[in-house]
Image (cartoon, grey):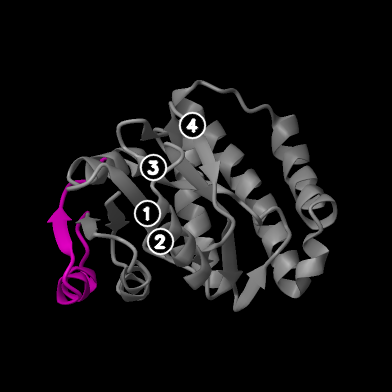
């Protein structure tokens, strides 16, 4: 079992070295960059990985194209702001040694937000398929929230991907603005109508679900920020969708 690790990038000089250096279990590391203007490509090349520059195809399209360029059928897909924990790396080494019992594997993702590891708020365990046989799985999703669809057997690893999210509220707001536009475009493309009642009620429900039902209050002030941002995300997504319809 040989593995190609793939990462798609755009201006990720802050994160890319950490992601690459966590991938010691991979037999090949491949970066697909979509026009970075910072040192992302230079840093990746200095670490000895293969770098392709390619136009943007959307998140799922970009990740599928990256998998097609791989030398090996087994793909380990990371985002640039993620890294394997040492425990997860050890689990993947064990899978390689024994040989894969499944066609794809999920793994939990632990997020660091405003300097704190988030264990509630609906953010954990946030299982993702990231290790898969490209002959049995591919990325799907036209706009946002892409995921891997698996046509074979699905296994589960127990150790964490580490997700280094926003370091400031300003960064979170910039990210939120970008992703709500994509989410609104998806709603508009599906011709989903957003009545005023949803615009009024859904943000409040999102806050209550995140902060109370998903125990965001246990994540301290950061949990409160996550709940408020989740409510604002819902409001912006629906507001933008209404403007696009």
Residue 115 % position (x, y) = 60, 79
* Mark 1: few/some/many CA within 10 Å (<14, 14-19, 20+): some
Is residue 92 on the magenta stretch? no
Task: Using the numbered discs, state the Cα–Cα distance from disc 2 to disc 4 in whole angstroms.
Answer: 20 Å
Q: Which quadrant would residue 68 be assigned to in this image?
A: top left
Task: Using the numbered discs, state the Cα–Cα distance from disc 2 to disc 1 in whole angstroms.
Answer: 5 Å
Q: Do the residues labelled 2 and 1 touch (CB within 8 Å)?
A: yes
Q: Which mark is residue 17?
A: none
First along the sequence among labels 2 and 4: 2
Q: Name the residue under label 3.
A: 132
Q: Name the residue under label 1.
A: 96
Q: In the image, is residue 105 above or below residue 142?
A: below
Left or right: residue 231 versus residue 214 is: left
Q: Mark 4 points at which residue?
A: 153
Under tag 1, what secondary structure? helix
Q: Are marks 3 and 1 in contact (CB under 8 Å)?
A: no
Under tag 4, what secondary structure? loop
* Mark 3: few/some/many CA within 10 Å (<14, 14-19, 20+): many
Q: Which quadrant would residue 51 be assigned to in this image?
A: bottom left
Residue occupying image coordinates x 64% and y 76%: 116
Nearer the observer: mark 2 or 3; the answer is 2
Q: Mark 2 points at which residue?
A: 93
């Amino acid at each position: 079992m040989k593995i190609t690790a793939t990462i798609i990038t755009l201006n990720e000089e802050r994160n890319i070295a950490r992601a690459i250096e966590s991938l010691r279990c991979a037999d090949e590391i491949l970066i697909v960059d979509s026009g970075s203007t910072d040192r992302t490509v230079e840093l990746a090349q200095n670490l000895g990985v293969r770098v392709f520059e390619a136009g943007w195809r959307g998140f799922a399209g970009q990740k599928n194209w990256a998998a097609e360029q791989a030398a090996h059928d087994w793909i380990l897909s990371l985002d640039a702001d993620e890294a394997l924990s040492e425990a997860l790396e050890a689990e993947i080494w064990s899978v390689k040694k024994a040989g894969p019992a499944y066609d794809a594997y999920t793994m939990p993702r632990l997020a660091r937000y405003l300097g704190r590891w988030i264990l509630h708020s609906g953010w954990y365990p946030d299982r993702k398929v990231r290790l898969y046989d490209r002959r049995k799985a591919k990325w799907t999703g036209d706009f946002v929230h892409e995921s891997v669809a698996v046509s074979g057997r699905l296994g589960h690893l127990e150790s964490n991907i580490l997700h280094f999210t926003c370091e400031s509220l300003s960064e979170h707001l910039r990210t939120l603005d970008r992703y709500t536009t994509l989410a609104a475009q998806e709603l508009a493309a599906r011709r989903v109508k957003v009545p005023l009642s949803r615009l009024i009620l859904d943000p409040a429900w999102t806050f209550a679900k995140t902060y109370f039902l998903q125990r965001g209050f246990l994540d301290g002030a950061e949990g409160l920020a996550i709940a408020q941002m989740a409510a604002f995300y819902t409001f912006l997504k629906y507001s933008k969708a209404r403007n696009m319809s």
